[in-house]
Amino acid sequence: MFYAIPLENRPTWRNPPWLTILLILVNMAVFWGPQRAEENAQKKAAAFYLSSSLPALELPAFVGWLEETASPRAPAARRMLQQRRYGALLDGLEHEKDFLARLHGGLVIRPGQAAHAQWEQDRRRYEALQPAPFTTRWAQDNTKDAPFRPVTWITAAFLHADTSHLIGNMVFLFLFGFSVELALGRGLYLAFYLAGALGASLLAGWAYAGQGGYGLGASGAISALMGMYAVMYRLRRIRFFYQLFFYFNYVTAPALLLLPAWIANEMLQHLIGGKGVAYMAHLGGLLTGALLMAAAMRWRKLTPPPAAAERTSDGFEQHVAEAKRLAAEMKFDAACTQWRAAAKLRPADGEVLRAWFNTARLQPAGEDFHRAAQRIFRLGPSDDATLELQHASYRTYLDQAKPGARLKPDDMARLARRFTRARQFDDADKLCRALLKSAPEHSGLADTLGICAQGWLRAGQRERALYWLPHLQRLAPNDMATRALAQA
């Protein structure tokens, strides 16, 4: 077993990989929608089957038929019958079309037999409980004399056998898909993804024709993305995590070198592995994806998303390392200079801003302390970690800044709204009062007071919320928040 996962690229939410996310959602909707409904109905039907007269009548005949036809499954089926593992035997019976044809043709339980009437009644009820086929209808059929249905070459890529199969595929779809989507654009990306699924199905159909079973899963199309990824980055050195049997490690290597490694792995697994995984579908996807990307890069100028090494060539990592070294040597002024430079390169990096702020607070009258605080207060994300960083930094800044805090009206309004969401009501109240006193004509004052008042009202602090009603009636008498507060 060998696989390699790229560790270099991260999605950019300035241009989100919406199509990759949509493909993931479609796969999940199909699995937890019609496939899960079908599975539940099949379980209900199987429960009736096992409680009826059918196992005693059909399963011994099924095992005998396997032995008569010299099926390689006969010894295992005989053991299942002896161990009374009727559920597993029923699953095997449902996939033997020849035996089912004999069963329905009256050649197994014959009309003259004493148990025929009971068998016919139970069999009719069992088949009435069976759901209309969905998975087998849209999966790739590898059984002998299977009907020619080209649509399944695509639809099979949106079906999965179980939850672990689905989750594993969706993880790899995201890891490789977003980079390829950003390089190709959504339209071409979707076309290549579906073409990869088609190429995977064609090779798998050739390799497994007549062997029985059904082909399903997104892994062939995802293998096509892996082939596209390798060709797209070609000789650029990409950092990968890889596993080879029980050994795993990290390696930085030209991306294109992984393509032959992936291809060799699929061929080896096909030769020595079992039939549970369609390795030829993976190989077909890899080859299709590689050829498609090679053609696209020849005829169309594509710019792949930069690798991490390229993104960090601006000196960010050097600034961070130098700042840590200088802080360890207690050279705090020089460390602040390095943190300031790092923050300029990554203005939304909360950890860099936190380190800059904590270093600068050792000199609370210094300009770095005020600038680091302002950068933190203006962070855009509203997740819990960012809100906690902003509130903790606000309290520290308010207590230690010399000669005093320099809070601009925009910052006060923003922090008041954020602290209300974080349920830091006392600090939100103080900021609203300070904003009203220092900037009574501020354009965001009414919105800020309305948001905060509604937050206090929802938290059960009615008196605190109503305190702001006169101000809201003056600033925004027709606002929805003002009317709601007046009716509270």
Image: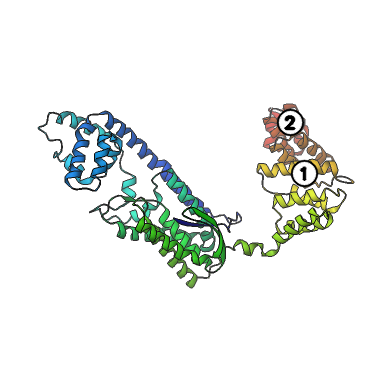
Q: Residue at x 31, y 31 (%)?
A: 47
Q: Is residue 332 left or right of residue 11?
A: right
**Few, some or many C-alpha atoms within 10 Å of disc 1 (few <14, some 14-19, many ≥20)?**
many
Q: Quadrant of residue 149?
A: bottom left
Q: CA distance from mark 2 to mark 1?
A: 26 Å
Element at badge 2?
Answer: helix
Name above or below for residue 472 compared with residue 326. Answer: above
Q: In the depicted view, which residue is nearer to us: 247 or 184?
A: 247
Q: Quadrant of residue 15?
A: bottom right
Tell me the quadrant of the picture where the C terminus can be found: top right
Q: In the depicted view, which residue is nearer to us: 231 or 471?
A: 231
Q: Is residue 217 left or right of residue 298?
A: left
Q: Give the x, y percent position of residue 200.
A: 38, 59
Q: In the depicted view, which residue is nearer to us: 404 or 70?
A: 70
Q: Which residue occupies the extreme right position in the image? A: 403
Tell me the quadrant of the picture where the N terminus can be found: bottom left
Q: Residue at x 67, y 43 (%)?
A: 385
Q: Which amino acid, mark 1?
A: Ser
Of pointers 2 and 1, the one earlier in the residue sequence: 1
Name above or below for residue 225 compared with residue 54. Answer: below
Total numbered badges shown on the rendered structure? 2
Q: Give the x, y percent position of residue 445.
A: 76, 42
Please name the residue that numbered disc 2 is placed on. 465
Residue 393 - label: 1
* Visible residue check, residue 31: yes
Name above or below for residue 36 compared with residue 456. Answer: below
* Visible residue check, residue 373: no
Q: Which residue occupies the extreme bottom position in the image? A: 298
Q: Quadrant of residue 384?
A: top right
